[in-house]
Image (cartoon, helix red, strand yellow):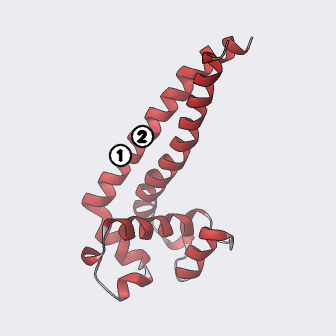
Amino acid sequence: MLTNFAYYALPFLFTLLVACALTTLVSGLYLWLFRIQITNNTLRHPYLDRQPWERYPLPLKVAMLLDYFLRLAFPSSQFWIIGHANRLLPHVERSKVPTAIKWPLMGLWGGCFIGIVAMLAVWVVLLLLGTP
């Protein structure tokens, strides 16, 4: 019975994983190539007061984008890294940020996090199929 479930779940989970990967890729490229300057000007991370965007290394740039996502997705939480992003960006009001700024961030990080969960589920199903 568990094998029947696995044979139905595996194609769905793999399709979800590929969809998340494509969503992350398309949203990230669009954000990086066309919207990064507008996003930074709209959301204005405090780190950008010290140096311009171009002078930061890639991991810090990605961390700033994660802070933007966490502030927009969880505006009232004070827990862990979400709370840190909310304390860094108290001036960002979710209702006033245009959708053209939100969707690339939500696609990039939402696809990434849902894709991680889908990847773990694919591995669990594969392990279930591999055990006799």
The residue sitting at 36% across, 69% down in the picture is: 61
Locate residue 130: give its quadrant. Answer: top right
Locate residue 86: give its quadrant. Answer: bottom right
The residue sitting at 53% across, 81% down in the picture is: 88
Distance from disc 2 to disc 1, alpha carbons, whole Å, reads 6 Å
The mark found on residue 21 in the picture is: 2
How many badges with numbers are in the image?
2
Is 128 in front, or is 80?
128
Q: Position of residue 40 (x, y in %)?
A: 36, 74
Tell me the SS state at disc 2: helix
Q: Residue furthest right?
A: 1
* Quadrant placement of the C terminus: top right
Q: Residue furthest front?
A: 132
The residue sitting at 45% across, 66% down in the picture is: 98
| Left or right of 89 on screen, residue 6 | right
Type of amino acid under label 2: Ala
Q: Position of residue 70 (x, y in %)?
A: 55, 65
> Do the residues bearing badges 2 and 1 touch, measured as CB atoms within 8 Å?
yes
Q: Position of residue 102 (x, y in %)?
A: 46, 61
Up-down relation of residue 70 to residue 112 (above or below): below
* Quadrant placement of the N terminus: top right
Up-down relation of residue 24 to residue 4 (above or below): below
Type of amino acid under label 1: Leu
Tell me the SS state at disc 1: helix
Up-down relation of residue 7 to residue 16 (above or below): above
Q: Position of residue 34 (x, y in %)?
A: 26, 60
| Left or right of 91 on screen, residue 108 | left
- Residue that carries the numbered disc 1 in the rendered image: 25
**Mark 1 surroundings: few (<14), some (14-19) or many (≥20) residues within 10 A:** some
| Left or right of 40 on screen, residue 54 | left
**Mark 2 surroundings: few (<14), some (14-19) or many (≥20) residues within 10 A:** some
